[in-house]
Amino acid sequence: MKYEIWHDQDPRFGFGERPEFPAAYTKVAVVESDDLDDVFRITNHIDHDWTTNPEVQWHQPGGCRSTSVGDIVVDENGTAYYCANAGWDKLDDEADQTEAAIANAMEDF
């Protein structure tokens, strides 16, 4: 499954209010993966620059930081997930995302 990686433009790492998606985020990559936990592994600098991982189909030019708490991953079905302190939180359809936000997030798929 393809996943879009969206990094918080002003990383809060889970502190404070959650910023508005997608306005406060930048799309930094598209990766191919089986699940969200693998997406997290793929998009972290563990022993090398994650953008060189074979699962990365596209990444923002100029390098990227590791995916962290507060970032968002959108699957190819348009479902958005917030990287939480432990695991992933599906964004609430009414409070955290709108059809327009998801359409915007998915337009480059």
Image (cartoon, rainbow, N blue to C red):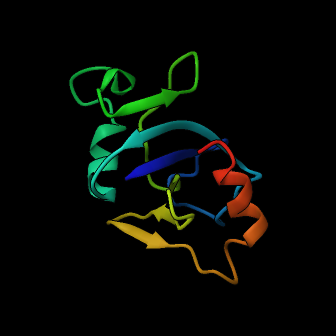
Looking at the picture, how far across and down is residue 6, in whole percent? 57, 46
Residue 20 shows in the view: no
Which residue is found at the position 31% from the left and 29% from the top? 45
Which residue is found at the position 48% from the left and 39% from the top? 30
Which residue is found at the position 34% from the left and 20% from the top? 52
- For residue 32, above or below residue 12: above
Q: Nearer the viewer, residue 66 or 94?
A: 94
Give residue 20's quadrant in the image: bottom right
Which quadrant, please, contains the C terminus? top right
Looking at the picture, how far across and down is residue 51, in whole percent? 39, 24
Q: How many marks?
A: 0
- For residue 60, above or below residue 107: above
Looking at the picture, how far across and down is residue 68, in whole percent? 43, 47
Give residue 57's quadrant in the image: top left
Q: Nearer the viewer, residue 102 or 50?
A: 102
Residue 47 shows in the view: yes
Looking at the picture, how far across and down is residue 59, in whole percent? 51, 27
Q: Nearer the viewer, residue 30 or 86?
A: 30
Residue at the far bottom: name it.
94
Query: In the visual, does 91 lie left or right of 100?
Result: left
Which residue is found at the position 69% from the left and 84% from the top? 94
Query: In the visual, does 7 lie left or right of 20?
Result: left
